[in-house]
Image (cartoon, grey):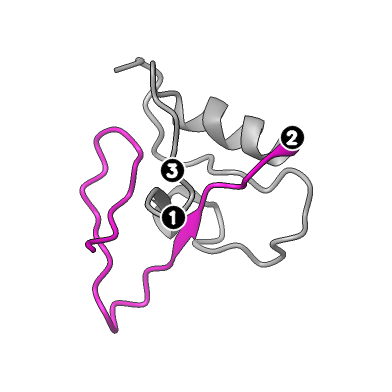
Amino acid sequence: MVISCVVVGCTKRFQKGSGLKFHRIPISGERRWCWLQAINRKNWTPVRSRDHVCGSHFSSGKLFNSLACLVCPTLCLFTKRY
């Protein structure tokens, strides 16, 4: 299975040794809501095992603390719904 970023317009895919991290969308709660608002895709429901957001969309490039309440993607996100 190819891991690719679900952010509209992002064409990044997982490549072993590239150093680019891919993060699964949170399962539930406020973090999930934050991520889905940031990703901003119309009529789309992510699948936990398949859908990822690449580190390019996080200000640090990666999640430092996966337990932080509102760590969510903020960079290079499109505002138009597709």
Residue beneath the point at 43% across and 67% down: 21
Residue beneath the point at 29% across and 84% down: 17
Element marked by disc 3: loop
Q: Quadrant of the N terminus?
A: bottom left
Element marked by disc 1: loop
**Closer-to-camera residue (2/7):** 2
| Left or right placement of residue 82 versus residue 31 in this view | left
Q: Which residue is mark 1?
A: 49
Q: Amino acid at mark 2?
A: Glu
Query: In the figure, 19 relative to 37: above or below?
Result: below
Q: Which residue is mark 2?
A: 30
Tell me which label, 3 or 2, sits earlier in the chain: 2
* Labels 3 and 1 touching (C-beta < 8 A): yes
Residue beneath the point at 61% across and 44% down: 72
**Highlighted range, magenta:** 1-29
Dot in front, 3 or 2:
3
The crowd level at tag 2 (other Cα within 10 Å; few <14, some 14-19, many 20+) is few
| Left or right placement of residue 32 versus residue 43 in this view | right
Q: Which residue is mark 3?
A: 47
Whole-angstrom CA distance, mark 3 to mark 1, is 6 Å
Tell me which label, 1 or 2, sits earlier in the chain: 2
Please say whether residue 6 is one of the residues in the magenta stretch: yes
Q: Position of residue 29 (x, y in %)?
A: 74, 37
